[in-house]
């Protein structure tokens, strides 16, 4: 009754017999007896953090392009309104994704536990018994972490095309429409990236969040003309836009720490969040030592 390969299984038929070896239906995965059983695991904290990372990725990119096309170095009512509209789009897409996912109409989901990176690429593990005919058993072994992200991206794009044009017409009608064009590019790119390297992202996203938050924080400070300590501190605390950007970097950095540690040690890991301001403080204190005009070789 065994099946070849890592993912081939048998489906229990209505008459009580078992089918031939093949791919398990969506939402099912074979057990130790090579029978396809319905996924009934509860997503772990890491699984939820991965889905949250995908949500934050879209939201941050929306905000980045809205801020970039506005060509303003300070907040006003129109820009804040566009940011709020983008947040509403992503939030609504997240809620609809959970409601549509199985079980429909609820805010919780069942999943198949991720066991290894192979689970994300079942296409490359179709067995060929006795080197003869290949048995195609490609399936979503990480249900629903793979397809749910695609559903979320699609809903984000649809909701943006429905809601954003009305908001852009009311707020910054000249510049803000470019944020729509940008999203029509970066969302399909995210879909392609997730389709190709979704498994790699699943295992590496905590490190990516930490690295990108530090790099983007340094880039934010680096664009300022005056790199003195007093100027960097003054422009950060005196301008609301800079305060919000810095707090956003800190939140992302904290998210990366929580994703990496999963707070498995409740006595030590929460204390690591106190290190969140360290990259910004390090840049401010050491920026004057990196001035090229002061380098003599």
Image (cartoon, helix red, strand yellow):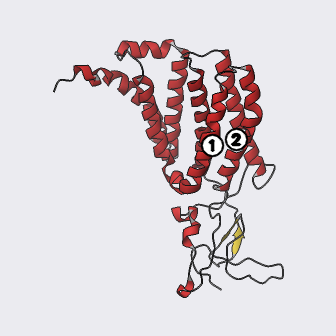
Image position, residue 144 (x, y; %):
67, 57
Q: Name which quarter of the figure residue 31 lies in.
A: bottom right
Residue 35 drawn above or below residue 223: below
**Tag 1 near tag 2, CB within 8 Å:** yes
Q: Which mark is residue 157?
A: 2
Left or right of residue 221: residue 109: right
Residue underneath mark 1: 187
Image position, residue 193 (x, y; %):
56, 50
Image position, residue 76 (x, y; %):
63, 15
Residue 193 drawn above or below residue 267: below
Residue 133 drawn above or below residue 147: below
Q: Nearer the viewer, residue 170 or 222?
A: 170
Q: Name which quarter of the figure residue 232 lies in.
A: top left
Left or right of residue 237: residue 164: right
Left or right of residue 209: residue 101: right
Residue for point 60% across, 84% down = 133
Of all residues, the one furthest to the right in this rendering is: 15
Q: Earlier in the sequence, mark 1 or mark 2?
A: 2
Of all residues, the one furthest to the front in this rendering is: 174
């Amino acid at each position: 009754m065994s099946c070849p390969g890592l993912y081939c299984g048998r489906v229990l038929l209505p008459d009580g017999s078992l089918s031939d070896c093949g791919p398990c239906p969506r939402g099912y995965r074979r057990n130790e007896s090579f029978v396809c059983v319905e996924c009934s695991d509860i997503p772990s904290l890491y699984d939820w953090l991965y889905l949250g990372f995908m949500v934050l990725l879209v939201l941050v990119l929306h905000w980045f392009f809205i801020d970039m096309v506005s060509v303003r170095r300070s907040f006003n009512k129109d820009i804040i309104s566009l940011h709020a509209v983008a947040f509403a789009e992503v939030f609504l897409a997240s809620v609809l994704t959970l409601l549509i996912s199985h079980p429909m109409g609820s805010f919780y989901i069942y999943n198949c536990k991720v066991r290894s990176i192979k689970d994300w690429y079942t296409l490359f593990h179709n067995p060929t018994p006795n080197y003869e005919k290949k048995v195609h058993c490609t399936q979503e072994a990480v249900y629903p972490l793979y397809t749910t992200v695609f559903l979320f991206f699609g809903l984000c794009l649809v909701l943006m095309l429905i809601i954003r044009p009305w908001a852009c017409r009311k707020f910054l009608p000249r510049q803000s429409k470019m944020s729509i064009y940008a999203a029509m590019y970066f969302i399909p790119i995210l879909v392609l990236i997730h389709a190709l390297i979704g498994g790699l992202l699943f295992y590496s996203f905590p490190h990516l969040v930490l690295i990108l938050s530090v790099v983007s924080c340094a880039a934010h400070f680096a664009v300022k003309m005056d790199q003195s300590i007093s100027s960097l501190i003054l422009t950060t605390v005196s301008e609301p836009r800079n305060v919000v950007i810095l707090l956003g970097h800190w939140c992302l950095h904290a998210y990366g720490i929580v994703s990496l540690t999963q707070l498995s040690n409740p006595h030590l890991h929460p204390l690591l969040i106190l290190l969140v301001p360290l990259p910004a403080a390090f840049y401010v204190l050491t920026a004057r030592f990196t001035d090229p005009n002061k380098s003599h070789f």
